[in-house]
Structure formats: C-alpha cells, structure tokens
Amino acid sequence: MIDLHTHTNESDGTYTPFELVDAAMAAGLDALAISDHDTLAGYDQALPRAREKGLDLVCGIELSTKARGKTVHLLGYFLNNPPAPEFRGWLEEMQASRRDRNVRMAERLRSLGIDITIEEVQKRGRSLAGRPHFAKIMLEKGYVSTIQEAFDEYLDESAKGYVDRYEPELAYGIKRIGEAGGISSIAHPVRLGYRDPERLRGLVKEMAEAGLSALEVYHSDHNPSDVEQFLGLAREFHLGVTGGSDFHGDVKPGIRLGAGAGNLNIPRSVLDRLREIPPQAS
Ligand code: AMP
Ligand code: FE
Ligand code: FE
Ligand code: ZN
C-alpha cells in the first residue's frame, strides 16, 4: 500500500514531517509522497528520517492554479531527481502571494466582527499559512462550531470572508513542473464540481495537450463511479494514474494515511508505473 497525497505541518497538516514518516511506517506503507501546498519544506525535513527508517519517500507538491476561473489543485512529483532550483524560487513567489492574501483576509474577517490577526495566523502556518489555519483559530475562539462551518460561512471561495490571491494558470503550472523535471497530476478531479462529464473531459483533453502527465484517480473523496470515470479519462488521453488519501492529520480526523476515508489501499504498482513515465518534454 502507498499514499501519494499527504500534508505536514509545513502546510496545513498537523503532523511534523518526522511524525508523518513514523506514521507511514506504522501504517505499513511501502511508499509515501509528501505533497504540501506550495512548499517543499516538509519533504526536505522528512528525507533524513525516511532514509533512516528505510521508507521510500517521494518529493511532491500541491499547487493552487486556476482554470476556467476556478481553483484547480495540481500535484507535482519529482520521482527521479529533486526539482530544479528555479522551481524553488517560483514556489517562494507563490508563498509571497499567499502571505499578501492572508493579510487582506485577516482584515476582511475583522471587518466582519471576528477577532483575528495576521500574526496569530502566521504563527500557526509555519512555512505557509492557509485557510485551514484561519478556520482553526475561528473554531478555538468559538465563532464557529466546526472547521467545516468556518469554510461554509466565511472561507469558501463563495463565502463572505474569502479573499482572492494570485494563482497561476493550470497549463502554466503543468509547464513549470515539467521544466523542473517532475510529472504533473490534476488533484481530486471530483472537487472541480463539474456536473457535466463532458466539461471535465474537455479540460483534461486540453491539459493533456499542454503536457499533463497524470490524473489523481484514487482519492478519499472519490466514490467507485468517480474512479471509473477518471480511469477512463486517463486511458483515453494516455495519462498516468496517481492516488492518495490527502491526509492532513487531526484537522481532517476522518482521513487515515493509506486507508483514506475507508479502504483506499492503493497498490505499489501505481507508483512503479509512474516511475516509467518519462519526465515531461518541455
Ligand atoms: P488555501 O490554500 O489557503 O486557499 O486553503 C486551501 C485549503 O483549504 C484546501 O486544501 C482545503 O484543505 C481547505 N478548503 C478549501 N475550501 C474548503 C471547503 N469549502 N471546505 C473545507 N475545506 C476547504
Ligand atoms: Fe490542504
Ligand atoms: Fe487539494
Ligand atoms: Zn492536498
């Protein structure tokens, strides 16, 4: 069993990189990818621990991009070599755009009567503070009674506290990951919320032409018919297949490493096949 989609406390997870490696060993995983939002800091810290424990650790990233006006999460995996240095520089630009957004979002929430400061948020977020950190603080202060309520009422893209930030176009994210020596995969396609399957097909076709390598077929949010649909798209457009639980630790208590929301159980062969994909031509 493997898990190619996990977060540490360097982004919005709650486990330290060390704890995540140990938890992966305890869960009996054959391989683990750390795919933090916009930062490689968790992977960098986990690497010595994974070597010591003999865990196959994959360098991953989850970028927030835009396609057709909506946020699309894009995974990148560096299966053979670490990403080129330019890529790390580009991630720093993403992080700066987040910090700027966070300042404006704290102001916006204060204008809605919520006592929250950017300092509090940044203290939680380490390399990268995101909306889940805002949600946790709002929960602790009693403004909402669940993390989900914080999103529904304030933080969701359609909610009153949301503030936009710069996000690169999906095709550009694909290009950057390819140029850095990685393979790209559209994360949890179900969350795009495209009700018409042809709409998703159109996007995948266009992105396959732009150099997309894979689709995240297996994910905690995908039901068996989603998996069927995405496998079909991967086959049609000659894309690879990735999968993972999207483990965030205690902020998403229903999601377990490797097992996801139940019995995700992704076989090692999924990673073996990814390793056969040549890095994107750029
Ligand atoms: P950010 O990167 O700061 O924009 O925050 C994005 C993260 O917030 C996602 O990775 C999810 O973990 C979480 N998130 C975004 N929208 C929602 C939502 N509607 N409900 C629950 N969690 C959400
Ligand atoms: Fe997240
Ligand atoms: Fe995501
Ligand atoms: Zn994720």
Image (spheres, rainbow, N blue to C red):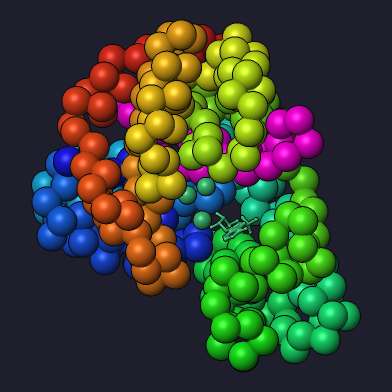
Residues 105 and 57: in front is 105
Image position, residue 170 (x, y; %): 66, 29
Residue 27 visible to the viewer: yes
Residue 2 in view: no
As drawn, is 161 to the left or to the right of 11?
Answer: right
Question: Magenta segment: does it hold 75?
Answer: yes
Q: Splitting the image into 4 quarters, where does residue 33 fall?
A: top left
Q: Quadrant of residue 161?
A: bottom right
Up/down of 61 relative to 46, above or below? above
**Residue at image point 27% right, 44% down:** 264
Q: Residue at x 53, y 19 (%)?
A: 212
State the residue at coordinates (79%, 76%). Answer: 109
Residue at the farthest right position: 111
Q: Position of residue 261 (x, y in %)?
A: 32, 54
Along the viewing direction, whichever of 177 and 167 lies nearer the viewer: 167
How far across and down, in percent of the image, does residue 178 sit? Answer: 52, 21
Q: Pick the quarter of the image with the C terminus.
A: top right
**Residue 8 at x, y = what percent?**
40, 60
- Indicate the quadrant where residue 155 lies: bottom right
For the point 57% across and 69% down, the residue is 148
**Magenta residues, start to end:** 60-83
In the image, is residue 248 part of the stretch drawn in magenta? no
Task: Examine the rendered structure and indicate whether residue 269 appears above or below residue 88.
Answer: above
Name the quadrant of the N terminus: top left
Query: Main structural element of the magenta stretch: helix, strand or loop?
Result: strand
Q: Look at the picture and state if 15 lies above or below 221.
A: below
